[in-house]
Image (cartoon, grey):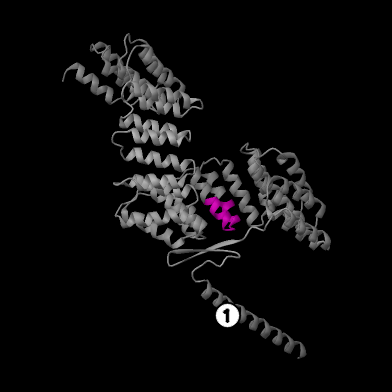
C-alpha cells in the first residue's frame, strides 16, 4: 500500500482530534498537503459533533490557496452540523466571490442555512433565483431544499410551486410538502398532496398520519392507519408514535394495546421515543400499571420519560407515587426541569396533597434554582387555596400573573383562585377573580362559578343577575363531551346533541336505568321508614 493510500485510510479511521492532527501531519509528509480530497476529508472530520474541532478546520481552510467547490461545500456542511448558520451563508457568498459555480450539493446546504435564521426567507429566495439561473431549479436535491425552506416559513404556495417544478419528485419531496401543509394547519391541502401520490412509501403514510394527529384530527389519523394496514405497509417508529398519541387523546385503550403488541410482533426495539409514547398512551387511558411496566422495562430513559411517568401518575391521582418516583429520579442523578415540577405540583393538586406540594415549591426554588413560572402559578394558587391560604393565593396572582403572561395561562390561574374562593365563601374575592377571567377570555365557566358562589352565599338575586348577563352577552355554557370505546370503535357524545346512530336504543337503556334507580330509592325510603317505626 502506498503512503498516499495509507494516509487517506488513516483519515477515515480518526477517532479524536489528536489522531486527526497526526493524520494531517502524515498528509503533509506524504505530499498530499494540497490534495483537494484529502483536505476535504480533514475538514469533514473537524465537523464531527463530538470529536471534531471547527476552529482547526478553519485554520486548514485558511491555508488553502485556491479551495475547490468540494472544499467549500464541506465547510458549509461543517457549519450546518455545528448550527452556525450565518457562517454557512457567508461561506456560500465566498463561493460566489471566488468565481465558483454552486452545484446541486451547495444549494441544499445554503437553503437549509437560510431556513434556520429569522431573516432567511429573502436570502432563500435569492438562492432560489441563483439556482434557476444555473439551471438547477428542477434538480431533486435543490427542489427538496426549496420545499423545506418555504414550508419552514409557512409560504406553502411557493413550496407547492417548487414541488411542481421538480422534474421527478421523490418520496422526500412529497413528505416535506405534506409536512409543510400540516405545519400551518392546512390538513385539507396536505391530504390532497397525499392523495395525488400514486406510489407511497411508509414515510409518506407516516407524514400524513402525523399531520392529522398534530392538528387534533385523531380519528382521521387512526382511520388512515387502518388503511395503511390494509395496503400492507409496515409502519416505522415515527408512525407508531403518532398513532399512540392519537390513542392517548381519544382514550382508545384496546387499539393502543393492539399497537403495542404489533410493535413487539415486528421486533421493533423499544427506543426512548417509543417508550415515552407508550407511557403517555397508557397513562391517559387510565392504565397506570401498564405505563409503569413499560417504564420499568425501558433500557434507557431521558428527562421526557421521567416527566411522562410522573405526569401519568399525577393525572391518575397517584400523588404519593409521583412524589416517590421523583425521589427515585433524584437518586438516579437525573436533574428535574420545569415540566417535572409542573407535573409534581399537578399531582399534589389532584391528590389533595397541599402541604407536600408547597414543600416541593421550596425544593424547586432552593435546591434546583428553578423559579416558579407562569405555568406553575395556577397549581401553586390551587395548593395555597387547599391549605386555606386564599389570601396568599390572591396576593400571588396579583404579584406574578396580572398582565404578565398569555391570556389563557393567566385566566387558568384566576379560575383556580375563583374556584377556591367560591369553596371558602369568599364571594368578594371571587368577584374580583371572575372579572379578570371575563376580561381575558369569553368563557362561561367564570359566570357559572360566580353564580354558584352567590347562590351558596344566599345572594340569589346576584346569581340571577349573573345568569342574565350571560344571556345578554351571548355567552353559552360550553357543552360537555365524552367518549367511550366499544370493540375498537370510539363513540363520541356531546351534551344536547342526538346525532348518534344508536341514540334511540341508548335512550331506552338510559330510561330503564333511571326507572331502576328510582325504584331502588323508593325501596330505601320504605326500608328506612320501617326501621324508624321499630
- Whether residue 496 can be seen here: yes
Please identify the quarter of the rendering in which residue 300 is found. Answer: top left
Nearer to us in this view, 433 or 317: 433
Nearer to us in this view, 492 or 359: 492
Nearer to us in this view, 113 or 371: 113
Circle 1 residue: 512
The quarter in which the C terminus is drawn is: bottom right
Q: Whole-percent x and y of residue 305?
A: 48, 47
Outermost residue, bottom side:
534
Magenta-colored stretch includes residue 111: no
- Whether residue 386 can be seen here: no
The quarter in which the N terminus is drawn is: top left
The magenta stretch is 309-324
Image point (42%, 41%), residue name: 179
Label 1 element class: helix
Q: Whole-percent x and y of residue 397?
A: 73, 44
Count up the numbered dots. Answer: 1
Image point (42%, 56%), residue name: 222
Image point (63%, 49%), residue name: 345
Image point (44%, 41%), residue name: 181
Amino acid at each position: 500500500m502506498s503512503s498516499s493510500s495509507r494516509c487517506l485510510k488513516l483519515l477515515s479511521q480518526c477517532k479524536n482530534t489528536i489522531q486527526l492532527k497526526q493524520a494531517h501531519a502524515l498528509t503533509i509528509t506524504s505530499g498530499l498537503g494540497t490534495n483537494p480530497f484529502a483536505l476535504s476529508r480533514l475538514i469533514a472530520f473537524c465537523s464531527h459533533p463530538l470529536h471534531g474541532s471547527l476552529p482547526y478546520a478553519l485554520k486548514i481552510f485558511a491555508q488553502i490557496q485556491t479551495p475547490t467547490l468540494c472544499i467549500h461545500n464541506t465547510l458549509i456542511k461543517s457549519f450546518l452540523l455545528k448550527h452556525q448558520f450565518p457562517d454557512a451563508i457567508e461561506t456560500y457568498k465566498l463561493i460566489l466571490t471566488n468565481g465558483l459555480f454552486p452545484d446541486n450539493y451547495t444549494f441544499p446546504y445554503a437553503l437549509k442555512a437560510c431556513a434556520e435564521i429569522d431573516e432567511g426567507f429573502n436570502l432563500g429566495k435569492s438562492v432560489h433565483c441563483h439556482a434557476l439561473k444555473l439551471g438547477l431549479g428542477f434538480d431533486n436535491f435543490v427542489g427538496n431544499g426549496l420545499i423545506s425552506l418555504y414550508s419552514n416559513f409557512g409560504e406553502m404556495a411557493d413550496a407547492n410551486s417548487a414541488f411542481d417544478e421538480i422534474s421527478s419528485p421523490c418520496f422526500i419531496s412529497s413528505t416535506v410538502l405534506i409536512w409543510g401543509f400540516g405545519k400551518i394547519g392546512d390538513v385539507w391541502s396536505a391530504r390532497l398532496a397525499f392523495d395525488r401520490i400514486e406510489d407511497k412509501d411508509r414515510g409518506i403514510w407516516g407524514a400524513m398520519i402525523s399531520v392529522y394527529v398534530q392538528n387534533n384530527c385523531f380519528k382521521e389519523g387512526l382511520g388512515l392507519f387502518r388503511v395503511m394496514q390494509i395496503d400492507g405497509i409496515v409502519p416505522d417508529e415515527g408512525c407508531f408514535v403518532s398513532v399512540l398519541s392519537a390513542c392517548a387523546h381519544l382514550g382508545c385503550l384496546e387499539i393502543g394495546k393492539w399497537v403495542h403488541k404489533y410493535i413487539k410482533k415486528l421486533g421493533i426495539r423499544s427506543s426512548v421515543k417509543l417508550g415515552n409514547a407508550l407511557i403517555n398512551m397508557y397513562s391517559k387511558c387510565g392504565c397506570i400499571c401498564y405505563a409503569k411496566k413499560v417504564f420499568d422495562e425501558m433500557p434507557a430513559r431521558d428527562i421526557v420519560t421521567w416527566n411522562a411517568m410522573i405526569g401519568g401518575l399525577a393525572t391518575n391521582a397517584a400523588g404519593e407515587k409521583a412524589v416517590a418516583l421523583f425521589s427515585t429520579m433524584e437518586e438516579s442523578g437525573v436533574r428535574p426541569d420545569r415540566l417535572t415540577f409542573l407535573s409534581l405540583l399537578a399531582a399534589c393538586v389532584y391528590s389533595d396533597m397541599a402541604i407536600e406540594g408547597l414543600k416541593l415549591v421550596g425544593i424547586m426554588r432552593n435546591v434546583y434554582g428553578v423559579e416558579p413560572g407562569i405555568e406553575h402559578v395556577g397549581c401553586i394558587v390551587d395548593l395555597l387555596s387547599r391549605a386555606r391560604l386564599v389570601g396568599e393565593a390572591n396576593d400571588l396572582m396579583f404579584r406574578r400573573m396580572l398582565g404578565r403572561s398569555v391570556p389563557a395561562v393567566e385566566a387558568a390561574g384566576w379560575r383556580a383562585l375563583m374556584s377556591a374562593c367560591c369553596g371558602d365563601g369568599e364571594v368578594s374575592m371571587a368577584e374580583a377573580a371572575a372579572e379578570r377571567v371575563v376580561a381575558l377570555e369569553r368563557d362561561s365557566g367564570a359566570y357559572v362559578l360566580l353564580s354558584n358562589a352567590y347562590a351558596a352565599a344566599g345572594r340569589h338575586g346576584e346569581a340571577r343577575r349573573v345568569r342574565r348577563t350571560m344571556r345578554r352577552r351571548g355567552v353559552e355554557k360550553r357543552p360537555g363531551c365524552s367518549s367511550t370505546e366499544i370493540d375498537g370503535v370510539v363513540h363520541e357524545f356531546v351534551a344536547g346533541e342526538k346525532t348518534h346512530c344508536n341514540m334511540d336504543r341508548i335512550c331506552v337503556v338510559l330510561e330503564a336505568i333511571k326507572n331502576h334507580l328510582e325504584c331502588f330509592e323508593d325501596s330505601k325510603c320504605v326500608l328506612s321508614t320501617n326501621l324508624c317505626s321499630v
